[in-house]
Amino acid sequence: MADAMDPPAFEGVVYQIYPRSFLDTSGDGIGDLAGISAKLDHLVWLGVDALWLSPIYRSPMADFGYDVADHTDVDPVFGTLADADALIAAAHERDLQVWLDYVPNHTSDQHPWFQASRSSRDDPKRDWYVWRDPAPDGGPPNNWRAAFAEAPAWTYDEATDQYYLHQFLPEQPDVNWANPQLREAMLDVLRFWKDRGIDGFRADVVHLIGKDPAYPDDPPEVAGVGRAGHHHLPEATAPHLRAIRETLELPPAAVMVGEINLPDAAQVATYVGEDLLHLAFQFSLIYSPWRAGYWRDIVGYVQREFDAVGAWPTWVLGNHDNSRVASRVGRAGAARAAMVGLVTLRGVPFLYAGDELGLEDAVIPPDRVVDPGGRDGERAPIPWDGSERHGWAGEPWLPWPPVPEIRNAAAQRADEGSMLHLTRRVLALRRAESSLRTGEQEVIDVADDVLAFRRTDDSGTHLVLINFLDEPTDAEVTGDWRIVLASDGAGEGGSYTGRLSPDQAVVLVTANG
Ligand code: GLC
C-alpha cells in the first residue's frame, strides 16, 4: 500500500473534451479531431495539463462512441488515425498530455469479436462475451436490468438459443474478462495507444469488468432499479486491474483514472492503489446539493477514505453524463465559486469542457433528443465566438446552450472579469503554488454556510473560503490574511476583512507571507 504522503500519480488538471461537441471543422456539424487541434493554443492559454477525449474509436454511435466497433481506428466523423497522431504530436509540443477513453466492459454489437461470438456456440470467441442459457421459464438468466432502458440486461439471441449480457444498451454486449484471450486483446488496446503516444486513459465503468461467475439475482431492494453499478465485485475485478496496471507501467508508461461509478467514496477507494488503478473518479460533489454542510462532509469523508488506502483523490463537478454544474447550482456566481473549489481541493481536478465558460445545459426540444440516456443537455456544442454558428463549420448536431452570444470563448477572452479568466487565474495559481497542488489539507469550521480548508506544505499555507449563500456572510479567521484570488474579483490584493460577499470564494495567504 502506498504511503499517504506519496506524490500523486498525476499532479495536473485534466480537461475533458467530448469530441462531438468541441468544434466542427469539416462542416458536418459534429466536432472532430482537427477542431481539437485547432484549439490547443487556447487550452495552453487556459492552463490545463492533460486532455481526456471521450471515445473517438470507430463506432455505430448507439451510445455515441461508448459502443466501440474497432479499438484501433478513429471513427470517420472525428477524422483519421493520422489526425489522432497529429493531435497527439501537437499536444506534446505544447506540454499537454493526451488521455483516451478506454471502454473495457463492453464493445459494440457490431465489433468483429461479437459478430464472431454470436455466430455459433462453438466459435473460438464465444466465451469472449457472457452467454447464458434461458431461465427454466425461457426468460432472462437473472433479474438484472440494463442502464438507460427499462429492460432486462440480457438479450435473447435466437440463432444460438442463449442470452447475452449487456449492462448498458443491447448494442453494448459485456465482454468476459475471465477469458484469457479476451483479456489479452483488451490489454493490446492499451499497448496500441500507448505506442502512439497516449499518456493516460480514463477507463469507462471499469469496476464492472470482474463478474460474479454465479450471476446471482439482485436483492429485492435494488432489483429493477436499472443501475448497472450494482453488479460490481471488487475481488473479481482486482486481478484484471493488476494486469492493466502492469501493462500501463511498461514503457512508454501511462496513467489511468477509473470511472468507478459507485455512490460511496469508500467503495471507490478500494479500486485504487499501488498495483490497482492510479486514480478513480468519485462523483460525490456532482450528486451533492450546493450546500456548505454537504460539501464539508464530503471533503472530509473523501479525504479520510482515500488517506486510509494511501490513495490520491479526484474531484469532478461536471461530465458528459450529468447536468452541468452551472445548471445545478443555478447562480453564475455560485458556479464561479465552485470552480475555485474544484481547482484548490486536494486531489486531481477534472474540468469538463465548457464549465470554464459557465455553460448551462441546452434545452433540447423533444424532436431533437438523440441520447437514450437523456444526457443531450450537457453535451451541447461549445460556442467559440459570437458569429452565427459560433465558430462551427456546420450546423451542430445539438442545440446551443443558453446565451451563446455572451457565453462563448472569444467574448470571455476579451473580458477579464469573465468565468474563463477566473478559471485561467485559479489554474495559474494552482500551478504556481505547490501547497495547492500537493499540500496537506485540513477542513476547518468557520461558519455554517462556508466551506473552509487549509492547504499547507513547506512553502506555506493557503486558506480557501467558499460562501454558499447568495448573501454576504461573516467568516472570521484568526490571523492576518491577504486575498490572492476572489471568484468575483472583489478585494483581491487587499486584506481579508472576515466577511465574504454573496457567492464569493477566496484564496488567502498570510499577510506577512
Ligand atoms: C459510462 C460513460 C457513459 C456511457 C456508459 C456506458 O458511464 O461515462 O457515457 O454511456 O459508461 O459505456
Image: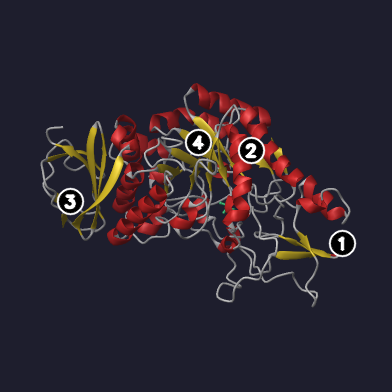
Q: Is residue 88 above or below residue 370?
A: above
Q: Quadrant of residue 292?
A: bottom left
SS at badge 3: strand
Q: Nearer the viewer, residue 114 or 435?
A: 435
Circle 2 residue: 78
Colour scheme in the image?
Answer: secondary structure
- Identify residue type, mark 4: Leu
**Identity of the residue drawn at 43% across and 40% down:** 386
Whole-number angstrom distance, CA of label 4 to CA of label 3: 34 Å
- Sequence-wise, the earlier of marks 4 and 1 is 4
Circle 4 residue: 51
Residue 425 locus on image (x, y percent): 31, 35
The residue mark sitting in front, 1 or 2, is: 1
- Sequence-wise, the earlier of marks 1 and 2 is 2
- Identify residue type, mark 2: Phe
The residue mark sitting in front, 4 or 2, is: 4
The answer, for residue 7, to whether it is visible in the render is yes
**Identity of the residue drawn at 42% across and 34% down:** 48
Q: From the viewer's perspective, is 107 left or right of 288? A: right
Whole-number angstrom distance, CA of label 1 to CA of label 3: 67 Å
- Sequence-wise, the earlier of marks 1 and 3 is 1
Q: Nearer the viewer, residue 143 or 379?
A: 143
Whole-number angstrom distance, CA of label 4 to CA of label 1: 43 Å
Q: From the viewer's perspective, is 120 left or right of 107? A: right
The residue mark sitting in front, 4 or 1, is: 1
Q: From the viewer's perspective, is 508 left or right of 78? A: left
Whole-number angstrom distance, CA of label 4 to CA of label 2: 16 Å
Circle 1 residue: 160
Residue 500 shows which numbered tag? Answer: 3
Whole-number angstrom distance, CA of label 2 to CA of label 3: 46 Å
